[in-house]
Amino acid sequence: MTFDFQASYDELNPADHDYRFYAALPGSRVLDLGCGTGTLALLMAASGRSVVAIDPDPEMLRVARTKGASDVDWRLGYSSAATSSSVDLAVMSGHVAQVFTSDDAWAAVLADLHRALVPGGTLAFETRNPAARAWERWTRADTLRTVGDVEFWHETVDVSLPLVTYDTFAGQEADRDVLAFRDESSIRASLVEAGFEVTAVYGDWDRSPLTGTSPEIIVIAQR
């Protein structure tokens, strides 16, 4: 039987500190890029905001739509599906920023988000801090979880910074992925190049300063 990762995503990722952080940001018209199963989009919509939620995975959107949010504009696609000058807050949660592994792909996403935001609009996202070397803890022993009767874990395959290759195991099945671990200076430079001004950088969801041991690089930027 094939493991339904999308249906199990929320169980595998129960923490909501990132969602609460983003939901506290100002903005009445929101773009949630890489919305996944829609948890953040639904939280935003519940507060009366207008929300566009985009994801390239139809199975993720399948799960999101079962949660019953008819007031969220669910869109299958990529950042190019965002409407120009349509939102005042754009977010990427769940380390979505790391899936854009090439500089060209990352620049294209930032350009699309800049286009989607109105002047003065806010972009917010997080990426794992490479200084914290999270990939060293991507082992079966450290990441093993069980969903139903299926064992689920990660194993690092290769580290060639800024790229980290890893396998995700679900029972006997394995999928290989690559993530980009960009440091603060490269993130800042890419945002400036895209026309953003970085207004805040945090190292964790409590808004603590970024240090060498911080698990996250959480960025707030303005168009």
Image (cartoon, rainbow, N blue to C red):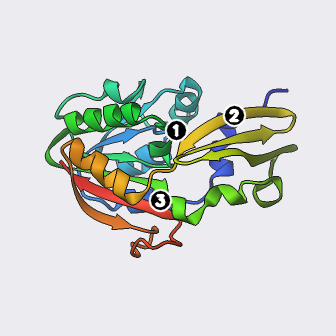
Residue 83 in percent (x, y) is at 24, 28
For mark 3, give the secondary structure. Answer: helix
| Marker disc for residue 176 | 2
Give the SS element for disc 1: loop
Say if 186 sits above or below 59 in the image. below
Q: Is residue 86 left or right of residue 17?
A: left
Left or right of 2? Residue 31 is left
Q: Residues within 10 Å of mark 1 (few under 14, many from 20)?
A: many
| Residue 141 disc label | none
| Mark 3 or 2, nearer chain start | 3
Residue farthest to the front, as pictured: 160
Name the amino acid, label 1. Answer: Gly
Residue 30: where, in percent of width, then height? Answer: 29, 44
Residue on which the image places disc 3: 18
Mark 1 near mark 2, Cβ–Cβ under 8 Å?
Answer: no
- Circle 2 SS class: strand
Tell me the residue at 48%/43% (across/down). 96
Say if mark 3 contacts mark 2, CB within 8 Å.
Answer: no
Disc 1 target residue: 36
Q: Nearer the viewer, residue 93 or 210?
A: 210
Whole-angstrom CA distance, mark 1 to mark 2, is 19 Å
- Percent across and percent down for residue 197 are 19, 54
Q: CA distance from mark 1 to mark 3?
A: 14 Å
Q: Is residue 39 visible?
A: yes
Q: Which residue is drawn at the image coordinates 53% and 65% (left, top)?
A: 215
As displayed, is residue 205 above or below residue 49?
below
Kind of residue indicated by mark 2: Arg
Marks 3, 2: nearer the viewer:
2
CA distance separating discs 3 and 2: 25 Å
Instruction: Inspect this view and state whether residue 71 appears.
Output: no
